[in-house]
Amino acid sequence: MAPNKLNSSSGNSSVHGSQSDNGFISSFSLFPEKAVQELLQSPVQGSDDHLIEFSEALRTVAKALRRVAEGKASAQAEAAEWKRKFELERARNLQFDSTEKSSLENQADLGDVRINNPANHPPLSKKANERFERCCSSNGICSHEVLRDGKSDSDSKMVRKASFKLSWYCKGEQSDQHKHDVVSFEKGNITTAERSSKQISLKWESSPQTVLILTKPNSASVQILCVEMVRWLRQQKKLNIYVEPRVRVDLLTESSYFNFVETWNDDKEVLALHTKVDLVITLGGDGTVLWAASMFKGPVPPIVPFSLGSLGFMTPFYSEHYKECLDSILKGPISIALRHRLQCHVIRDAAKNEYEAEEPILVLNEVTIDRGISSFLTNLECYCDNSFVTCVQGDGLILSTTSGSTAYSLAAGGSMVHPQVPGILFTPICPHSLSFRPLILPEHVTLRVQVPFNSRSPAWASFDGKDRKQLEPGDALVCSMAPWPVPTACLVDSTNDFLRSIHEGLHWNLRKTQSFDGPRES
Ligand SMILES: NC(=O)c1ccc[n+]([C@@H]2O[C@H](COP(=O)([O-])OP(=O)(O)OC[C@H]3O[C@@H](n4cnc5c(N)ncnc54)[C@H](O)[C@@H]3O)[C@@H](O)[C@H]2O)c1
Ligand SMILES: Nc1ncnc2c1ncn2[C@@H]1O[C@H](COP(=O)(O)OP(=O)(O)OP(=O)(O)O)[C@@H](O)[C@H]1O
């Protein structure tokens, strides 16, 4: 194991003494074992049996304490995993509830009248159940109509969120099958039943009515495009438009015509945005897509990212052609990439129990745990589910999504991974070890990064390059895949867009072709 080699090559005599029972070196050296070794090797060693006994006792206590700390770490990781499963289940149930609601309403032909209290709902009838099976289980996933707070719009009509259907494409063929099993055991043969990653297609079942436009701040070109786009979407497409409060002020400064543009007043309203908005348009670079994703702490509406930045890995749409692009997106179908996000919990040692954990933070690119302004090496203990992974000694660690694999993780030596590959990248930053290669772990794991109690300095976590949080010794960051991915519209499809971005954005493997004339294999 990497830390083993590093320790032994640096001549650390405590290696064997601190090897734990499950075979890894823990850095929970709460007792200075080096000092104990020195005592053992000193001239007093032979003469003072008590001292030897005392040092043995110290070592036993150190081992016991280490086991307790490891036990606590694994219990916390398990609790986080249960919490994640619970949240996943709750999200599924909520989705199921809204399906149930719309099925019942359709059956009773209630038109626009909605029952707001799910508790009033009778259990699903057999017919509704069959309908749910037909609609969601075998024909892709349907979105469900959501009312806008029960309020009416300016024309005093109820505004519904547009509904859509998702289906999968594999090798150019459409498949409506929504199969849960990845492996089939039919007739005793083990075969792969479904590929986990396919091109997803979104088809509107009712027309989108509300868009949210998010813009990169302090950019004149973005501001000009925003004014034009809002006018066009309203006049030509009759859409309701939401913008950020600062953008609404800008638009009203431009002209009082933009009075129809809506915004929000507080964070509570931001949390409800996903129930009102059919489509999010971003005008900026990758940072604006990250910003858009960070606004949605739960489900995210499809995002159409227009490129007005320098690199644009996640922004395939050309702003010059916005009318044609939006025309075709509003009609559908749209190829979309479902970009996974990571859900991060900071767990403070000072917290009395797991439920005092801070609000989870969702990241689209990565969470980074680094040394911040400290000049000391970071010392981070990493666990994957209940297994010890390694101890990171270096500048830090990046836990990245596959979408983020072309960002900071790439700069730190991680692989570039297609965004539809389900996985978590584990990439060290400047590790002080010759053998620390980056890893890619499966998407179902829970990772835990612990700042050990004996760390010389605190560590710092940052989320998509923002919101730095200090992690004191004893604090931990627990991270797993979030149940709410970010659906981004593709220009062609997720593979074509990914390859185009690494070619155009990074000039990947660009080399002059060798000329034909010259020596040949005879
Ligand atoms: N050494 C590095 O490469 C480094 C250092 C710090 C942060 N970052 C990245 O910057 C991101 C924040 O982006 P920002 O725009 O808010 O900050 P920013 O304005 O500092 O831009 C960072 C750069 O990273 C690019 N980028 C962002 N996400 C990308 C992705 N998924 N694939 C390819 N390139 C991507 C952006 O286009 C931009 O050029 C962080 O999530 C982190 O990944 C990279
Ligand atoms: N709507 C927004 N509100 C506040 N900050 C934003 C918003 N959109 C983007 N930002 C921030 O502005 C910064 C720059 O955004 P972005 O990356 O989109 O533009 P860029 O730097 O010009 O693009 P590129 O990185 O491709 O050169 C990012 O740090 C991002 O978080």
Image: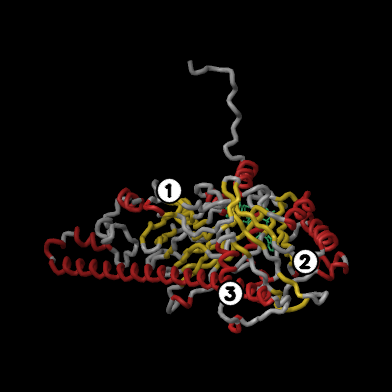
Disc 1, disc 3: CB below 8 Å?
no
Q: Residue furthest front?
A: 127
Task: Please name the amino acid that badge 2 sits on.
Answer: Ile
The residue tagged 2 is 241
Report the residue marked by disc 3.
97
Q: Is residue 265 left or right of residue 136?
A: right
At label 3, the amino acid type is Asp
Residue 468 drawn at (x, y percent): 56, 65
- Residue closer to the observer: 337 or 191: 191
Per the model, the C-alpha gap separating discs 2 and 1 is 47 Å
Q: Earlier in the sequence, mark 1 or mark 3?
A: 3
- Determine whether the residue tagged by mark 2 lies in a helix, strand or loop: strand
Cα gap from disc 2 to disc 3, whole angstroms: 28 Å
Closest to the camera, between mark 1 and mark 3, is 3
In the rendered structure, the answer to whether residue 499 lies left or right of residue 39 reads right
Cα–Cα gap, marks 1 and 3:
45 Å
| Residue 128 percent coordinates (x, y) | 59, 72
Q: Nearer the viewer, mark 2 or mark 1?
A: 2
**Dot 1: what SS?**
loop
Q: Amino acid at mark 1?
A: Arg
| Residue 437 numbered mark, or none | 1
CB under 8 Å between discs 2 and 1: no
